[in-house]
Image: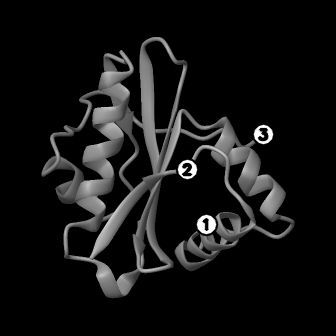
Amino acid sequence: MIRYEWVWRPDAAALKGIAGLYKAAGWWEPGDTPQRVCRMVMGSHCFLVARSGRRLVGMGRAISDRTNDGYIQDVFVRPGLRGRGVGAELVRRLALRLRIDGLGWVGLVAVGGTRPFYEGRGFRKMSGHEPMRFQA
């Protein structure tokens, strides 16, 4: 059975599990530390994990201006549990949390191949918009 938990102040065990998810997703960079993960979690609007027993099997977070706009990011589910609704539930709960907190605009950047997944959760491509990242 999968349990979903909001993480506000991660303890050492939670940080280890979350760091493991970032590593499994390929998002762990040289120089990343559990302390950095702690700052990311605590600096997020909200951070949600999926747990199977004691093991973290999925995560997602939202960042926001806490007034109007919110972005869902870092959604990841371990490969062995994909296709079972875990990612869908993470996204559903994150979007709902943002709406409950009064944010009227909720967006995300869908990486290659994930667009159908997010469209199935109510997200639509923004015509005339293109995600960009500062590289200078």
Tell me, yes or no, whether the two marked residues, 2 and 1, touch with CB atoms within 8 Å.
Answer: yes
- The front one of 135 and 115 is 115
Q: What is the secondary structure assignment of the residue under circle 1?
A: helix
Sequence-wise, the earlier of marks 2 and 3 is 2
Q: What is the secondary structure assignment of the residue under circle 2?
A: loop
**Residue position for label 3:** 136
| Residue 54 screen position, x and y as percent | 50, 79
Q: Label 3 neighbourhood size at 10 Å, few (<14), some (14-19), many (20+)?
A: few
Q: What residue type is labelled 2?
A: Val
Question: Residue at 37% across / 59% down in the picture?
Answer: 4
**Residue position for label 2:** 7
Question: Residue at 36% across / 42% down in the picture?
Answer: 94
Instruction: Report the side of 134 relative to 100 (left or right).
Output: right
Question: Residue at 20% across / 76% down in the picture?
Answer: 83
Sequence-wise, the earlier of marks 2 and 1 is 2
| Residue 6 screen position, x and y as percent | 47, 48
- The front one of 1 and 61 is 1
Q: Label 2 neighbourhood size at 10 Å, few (<14), some (14-19), many (20+)?
A: some
Instruction: Report the side of 48 relative to 92 (left or right).
Output: right
| Residue 17 screen position, x and y as percent | 61, 72
**Residue position for label 1:** 18
